[in-house]
Amino acid sequence: MLRALDTAPVPAVPYYVPAGNECTLFAHAHRNRLPVLLKGPTGCGKTRFVAHMAAELGLPLFTVSCHDDLAAADLTGRYLLKAGETVWVDGPLTRAVREGGICYLDEVVEARKDVTVVLHPLSDDRRILPLERTGEELAAPDGFMLVVSYNPGYQNLLKALKPSTRQRFVAISFDFLPPERETAVVAAESGLAEGKVRPLVSLAGRLRALKGQDLEEGISTRLLVYCATLIAAGMPAEEAVTATMIEPLTDEPDVRTALAEIARATLG
Ligand SMILES: Nc1ncnc2c1ncn2[C@@H]1O[C@H](COP(=O)(O)OP(=O)(O)OP(=O)(O)O)[C@@H](O)[C@H]1O
Ligand SMILES: [Mg+2]
């Protein structure tokens, strides 16, 4: 006889290897209704971390990639014409507030200045979202959490977060994982054996040391995953390294030659 399964399917929690106590800190911030700011270089795991924590805490996640044309109405919502009628459509921030989920604003420094106007009352102890257009004022439920991230490396003076904004957030600094953990991550993400990933991670370490001299930004864990994925798929290691760990970093022929030299010396 068939028995009905009494367990609902558990949603998969995205794989994330912590660098330190960031998971506990994030959970505490959520429990205490505090917003969080994540900072760190590109491709070091910020987005993955938020996806992981949202699943761990069982919260819906609304992610917005900010750009220089992103206005407050893109977050809150706007009236749209639908089948001849004007209807209000919630933006991702409003949905996160109504549903008690996480609103994650990636590269928040890129957004237009009017965005801070909606973020401020939500990110201090008022926790309210005024919707001017509809005349509503939403009080954020306990589940709601505002998470923003940015990459301090690209910051210029015009685009820095104002102190009045950054001082509303619990801040967590991200960096690349220590070599052993990064090796485990790259192997897990790509399917390439750890023994073959290890030399790629040490090459990444050497290339990261050039940041600020010849390179604007150190090589990301993301590119390491690409490299290992191509090698696991059967591409010759040298070609994969050139395509993922050298070419994306620079357009300067001299720098490219120097990086290739370091790669040859490291990988043999
Ligand atoms: N700690 C980690 N645990 C698991 N996977 C990781 C971790 N760090 C990095 N990764 C891997 O690196 C990839 C890039 O990470 P992610 O997209 O989270 O970077 P990011 O910091 O959000 O970068 P960006 O600033 O460019 O948006 C992930 O897709 C994942 O494969
Ligand atoms: Mg990201």
Image (cartoon, grey):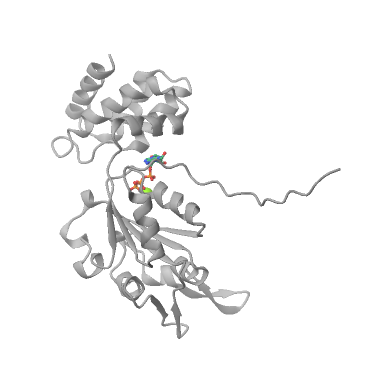
Residue closest to the far right: 1
Percent position of residue 206, x then y: 21, 28
Q: Quadrant of the N terminus?
A: top right
Which residue corresponds to the image point at 37% horizontal and 53% vertical from the top-left?
24
Residue closest to the far top: 268
Which residue corresponds to the image point at 32% horizontal and 30% vertical from the top-left?
180
Look at the picture and state if 126 lies above or below 150. below
Left or right, 149 with respect to 64, comes to left
Percent position of residue 78, x then y: 47, 74
Looking at the rendered structure, the number of numbered marks drawn on it comes to 0
Which residue corresponds to the image point at 37% horizontal and 66% vertical from the top-left?
32
* Visible residue check, residue 17: yes
Look at the picture and state if 173 lies above or below 215. below
Look at the picture and state if 61 lies above or below 187. below
Look at the picture and state if 159 lies above or below 43. below
Which residue corresponds to the image point at 35% horizontal and 78% vertical from the top-left?
126
Q: Quadrant of residue 139?
A: bottom left
Front one among 245 and 80: 245
Percent position of residue 237, x then y: 37, 19
Q: Quadrant of residue 74?
A: bottom left
Front one among 154 and 186: 186
Residue closest to the far bottom: 135
Q: Quadrant of the C terminus?
A: top left
Percent position of residue 81, x then y: 56, 75
Left or right, 95 with respect to 154, comes to right
Q: Quadrant of ligand 1?
A: top left
Front one among 144 and 257: 144
Left or right, 176 with respect to 101, comes to left
